[in-house]
Amino acid sequence: MEAGAPDGGRPQRGKSWLKPVSLPPTWQRRILFTLGAALVALAALLLAWAADVAVALLGRVAAGRLWVVFLLTPLGLAFCTFLTRTVFPGAQGSGIPQAMASLHMEDPRHINKVLSLRLTFGKLVLTILGLFFGATIGREGPTVQIGASIMNSLGRFEVMRGKEMQRVLVLIGGAAGIAGAFNTPIAGVIFAIEELGHSFDSRYTAALLGAVVVGGVATLIFASHFYAGGYVYFGTVHATMAFGVAYGAVVIAGVVGGLLGGVFGRILARAPEGFPKIIGRFALRRPVLFAGGCGLIVAACNYASGGTTFGSGYAPARALLHGQVTVGYAFAALKYVALTASYLSGIPGGIFSPSLGIGAGLGYWFHGLVPGVSLAAFAMLGMAGYFAGAVQTPITAAVIVMEMTNNQSMLIPVTATALLAYVVSRMICPQPVYGALAEKFLAAIEPANPASHG
């Protein structure tokens, strides 16, 4: 008969399976944090690999017959929206607003619903389908929700219970998700503090850092099975800027990135209530048909760009960062429209990596205007500027660009660009887009929650 089982059967429900080894609760939590971080890293790599397969498959389907996107994308986005609203409600959009909203929920049942493993499965499948159908979306936002869900599931163990611990698990899961998706551990920590939590209890700093480090190591180990030669996002970018006149590029990238990012954030934050009445009413009453209309806009952008606005825009952005021009001047504008339409359709998908692609395209727009600033340098500034303008997390923007390009010599101009873009963006969109979307999501789940009213 097993100890702790009064009826001679299974142990009482709620008892930790780690108890028989007689480890102190602190060590039990450390083991669970480590296991969870490794699982998040594996999930991030699986999603990355599956996303690459989906985009490659779309490329083969559309090769030589790009017109097919006018059928595939509208129908595909309508189908994904239908599944999102009927089978996986709560899976729409980036996933970051859901993780943020869960931090303010009072009822643990609501948190477990938003961050359930079932919803995690739906998020993963629908993101992959969206990429195959030609949507301009990223996988990093969904990875945050998936990471938070995996870590939240550990809350069923006795040593991980409690409201404060649940909040810590969500933050750690989100940080590990960003770290695993981009292979940027520092940016993962910064994002958790700057965006997800806005503040962080110092008692759990070691747990946060430890989980991200474990996730980073696990990413490198798992990546060898998915990517030949390891998992490097943009590779080492050799770009420098001398102090002086060249810093005019900082002003250009910061102002333009902030303006466009602020408009983008304002559109997303106000949708669909802020749309003209006819469009807003149609979006609310006929969401699946509205998604099909958004898909038609995305398809037109993909067709006009020669297929370069598909997915995240990783390949064009990487090429520009290495001084190679594979897109036209219309790339940034077309991807901007395609990303906006993709997100407004209501399908699951993030805006992180597409925003970086748009930013690199903005750098291509202006790289010849300032003497002494290479295309690679301007692409880095454009990425930091637009990302900071769209998401309004300047520190995360600077750190993530530095980590993804493995370039420390551009730290000062990249950071200055991100800060300037943040200031400009706030003038247009006073509330950060993720915060606004999180409030809407929270109000729908817990209408009486004071946090849902600002």
Image (cartoon, rainbow, N blue to C red):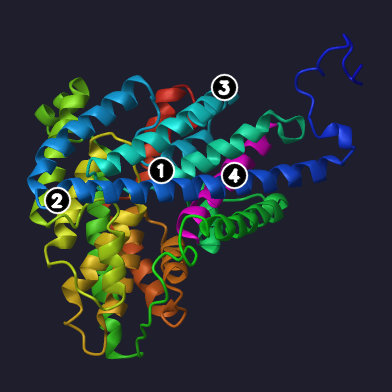
User: Measuring 33% from the left and 72% from the top, which residue is drawn there?
Assistant: 380
Query: Where does the image place residue 358, in percent across and percent down from the top left?
Result: 25, 60
Q: Please name the residue that numbered disc 2 is placed on.
A: 302
Query: Disc 3 residue type?
Result: Arg
Distance, label 4 to label 3, CA atoms, is 23 Å
Q: Is residue 215 left or right of residue 131?
A: right
Residue at which label 1 appears: 435
Q: Which residue is mark 3?
A: 109
Magenta extent = 162-183
> Do residues under tags 1 and 3 come within 8 Å of each other at their CB atoms?
no
Q: Amino acid at mark 2?
A: Asn
Q: Tag 1's secondary structure? A: helix
Q: Nearer the viewer, residue 350 or 447?
A: 350
- Find numbered disc 2 in the image and state the secondary structure of the residue it sits on: helix
Measured as percent of width and height from the top left, residue 311 is found at 27, 50
Q: Where does residue 402 sit, x and y in percent of width and height?
A: 44, 71
Q: Residue at x 16, y 29 (%)?
A: 290
- Residue at screen point 52% across, 55% down: 225
**Circle 4 residue:** 39
Amino acid carrying mark 1 in the image? Gly
User: At 22% across and 51% down in the image, what residue appears?
Assistant: 59
Q: Is residue 340 left or right of residue 233?
A: left
Query: In what element is the residue under mark 3?
Result: helix
Magenta stretch, main secondary structure class: helix
Marks 2 and 3, how far apart in space?
A: 41 Å
